[in-house]
Image: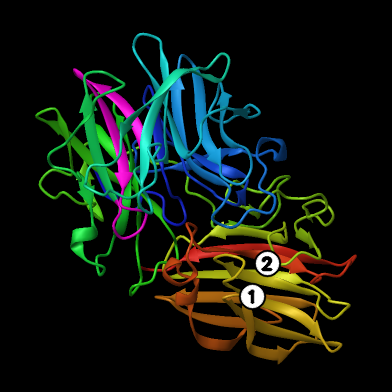
Amino acid sequence: MITLKNPILSGFYPDPSICRVDKEYYLVNSTFCYFPAIPIFHSRDLVHWEQIGNVLNQNSQVDLSGCEHSGGIFAPTIRWHDSTFYLITTNMSHGGTFIVTAQSPYGPWSEPHFIAGTDGMDPSLFFDSDGRVFYVGTRPNSGGVRYFGDWEIWICEINLQKMELVGKDTVIWRGALRGAAWPEGPHLYKHGLYYYLLSAEGGTEFFHAVVIARSECITGPYEGNPANPILTHRHLGRNSTIVNVGHGDLVDTPDGTWFMVLLGSRPCEGYTNMGRETFLASVEWQNEWPIVNPGYGRVEEIQTINMSDCPLPPQPCCDHFEGEYLNNQWMFLRNPTANLYSLSERKGFLRLFLKPQTLSGLDNPAFLGVRQRHQNYLVETKMEFTPHCDGETSGLAVVQNNHYNIRFEKALQNGKAVVQIVQRINNKEKIIAQEPFSGDMLYLKIVEHRRIIRFFYGESADTQQLMFDSLDSKMLSTEIAGGFVGCCIGLFATSNGKKSDGYSDFEWFEYVPADE
């Protein structure tokens, strides 16, 4: 037995999909505008997870140019069949639905195979026992959209040798509840005598829910579970510690025990800055229907599950930039361009080159970020930066999207070097605090505790002083900023629209969770 503490992946890890290979489990998530796209995790006990790579880690595999923060890569599904891993997903900004394959979850993953005729999103694959393979996805109601969110789930056979749909598609589901909005995230399974269709509905916010239907024939008709939705937190109210639960995927263990991975959010006093995270729940089959967390019927923060404890190496929280490559947790905004950064120009430092692009645009700025994974955390960096022209800035940034973010930066203004805090809300910028600073070496530290952010700076670790102590981060929440992503925190450098040969050197970056 092992004690489970939810979420199993904290921070912006939405739309989880999972598969098992013998006793090993692999899980992937949506990444939207971020690159590399689709992190892939490995576990032996469903509780401890190690990121082993990113599925789409080459510019040739995914085009994210110009996409909004909530555009790009939606809802991947990972499956394993006959010694091959299949990953199917949709690039909502460029190209549509595609499949990549690999013989190992560590990669390399193939170039994308785009599947014609797959309008919509949230694709999944099902491998039937007779050798046939089926595509299942969601799209606008083919009979005519009657209201916002009037979508449907459909199925079609697919030839994976030719990477094309076969024959006629069939509509199999339009939601469990009358007037259901956004039936999405479909996955098919075979259990006993039935095919089971697991899906979400209600929209991926407060009214989100997991529903299930079954049929003796894969193309239907499907009957809904009389107990639908089989999982939701919308009836618990907006003050629940876990909200927005939905978009699940089922997995069984070698001994026949079942679990569900799903997304949910943890608001802090009504505001959600970390986006949608990955949670785990137990599943039992009763009367040929699945029951989620029997006796509780909701996602538990802490529970005991029937698994052996197999801890994996902890994910790094501090990067000293001593390796040849960045670790797997770093992300860029959209496809990284040439001469964005270097780990070799100055050994033991990350060098970010000043680019004209900024965090307020839809290009690829000089920004590397990690996910905010805790409500209480400390982020710190040591940097060397000498701006030579007005507008050249570098430092730390907390980014929700291009319209809502915070920069803690060194800049040159009217020929004088300053350290300043800049808040961008609804595309309008405001300097919150500013102090003169003439040194080249700069320590920057951000500390957040239950939405309140404090900012520290100094020429050394021992001489840091408080610059601002009461910035409310709620403007970076999805409730205010909107969208599907959570906050990312990282390093940036920009010349603000001008050509520059400048750069900023970072000796280390540290993200430390605090007690929740």
Q: Residue at x 34, y 62 (%)?
A: 266
Choose top left, top right, bottom left or bottom right for residue 115: top right
Q: Is residue 1 visible?
A: no
Kindly give the residue lying farthest to the top in the view shown: 130
Q: Is residue 496 above or below residue 335?
A: below
Observer-nearest of 206 and 309: 206
Callout 2 secondary element: loop
Q: Amino acid at mark 2?
A: Leu
Choose top left, top right, bottom left or bottom right for residue 96: top right
Left or right: 402 with respect to 229?
Answer: right
Quadrant for the N terminus in the image: top left
Quadrant for the C terminus in the image: bottom left
Choose top left, top right, bottom left or bottom right for residue 347: bottom right
Left or right: 390 with respect to 420?
Answer: right
What's drawn in magenta, residue-wise? Answer: 184-208
Q: Is residue 435 magenta?
A: no
Of callouts 2 and 1, which one flags the residue occurring earlier in the amino acid sequence? 2
The numbered mark at residue 359 is: 2
Q: Residue at x 21, y 46 (%)?
A: 177
Q: Residue 238: where, in percent of width, then height?
A: 26, 68
Q: Is residue 192 magenta?
A: yes
Q: Residue 384: where, in percent of width, then height?
A: 78, 71
Q: Is residue 164 above or below residue 361?
A: above
Q: Distance between the Cα atoms at labels 2 and 1?
A: 9 Å
Q: Residue 327: where, in percent of width, then height?
A: 62, 48
Q: Residue 83: where, in percent of width, then height?
A: 49, 16
The numbered mark at residue 407 is: 1
Q: Amino acid at mark 1?
A: Arg
- Of helix, strand and loop, which mostly describes the magenta segment? strand
Q: Are marks 2 and 1 in contact (CB under 8 Å)?
A: yes
